[in-house]
Image (cartoon, helix red, strand yellow):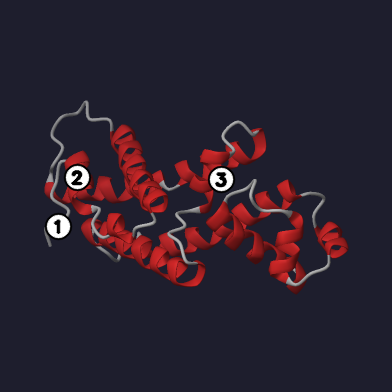
Amino acid sequence: MSATRDKLIYAAVELMLKNGYHAVSVDGICSRADVKKGTFYHFFVSKEALTLQAMDYRHQESRKVCDSIFSSAFSPIERFQNLFDYIYQTQVDLYKKLGHVCGTLPVTLGSEMACHDDIGKKASEIICFYEKYYKSALIDLMTSVDIYNDPNIDIDDICSNVNCYIIGKITIARIRNSLDFLQDFSEGISSIVGFDLAKA
């Protein structure tokens, strides 16, 4: 990937994290990246094409972090606590840089562009992808403390609810522009999971 292409992607990520899709123009992206408009179209056929690339870029970054966070070297509870710390610190850093609680790119764009086939679909796929991490941690948690004795427990449903809770907290933090909502996920997720994640 060229340095110029990188600059356009970075600019799109930052602008869309803060302002969403429709409020960001190609001109605005070029200005932020200090790239001429003609150069933009050398790399991307449209703002939509750049947006999809930006979402992929951000997703790959997050996957690398989550691969580390959810490593089997950590206990299941440590994995969740590491995730909560990562979410909070990421939003703190974005707040300092962009002046607003920004949330995540797939949630921000997905809620705005839900009816847009390509962007909405990609956002949904990325959001659901992280449930595999939660499932792995919860299966290990179930094994280690035997918290689920009911064979009819639907682990996939629990993971979906955990994901919805995390997304909801991040979304409210963005809407209210308050980091306070991101300081503690443990209580809500403990209620969903049926085990106190605050336990060491």
Residue 142, which numbered label? 2
Residue 177 sits in quarter: bottom left
Which numbered disc flags the more N-terminal residue, 1 or 3? 3
Rendered view: 67 above or below 157 = below
Residue 109, which numbered label? 3
How far apart are the alpha carbons under marks 1 and 2? 16 Å
Where disc 2 sits, the SS reads: helix
Q: Is residue 55 visible?
A: yes
Where disc 1 sits, the SS reads: loop
- Judge left or right: residue 125 versus residue 82: right
- Quarter placement of the C terminus: bottom left
Which numbered disc flags the more N-terminal residue, 2 or 3? 3
Pick whichever, 93 or 78, lies toward us: 93
Residue 198, which numbered label? 1
- Quarter placement of the N terminus: bottom right
- Residue at 82 percent across and 50 percent down: it is 45
Q: Which amino acid does label 3 sit on?
A: Leu
Residue 80 sits in quarter: bottom left
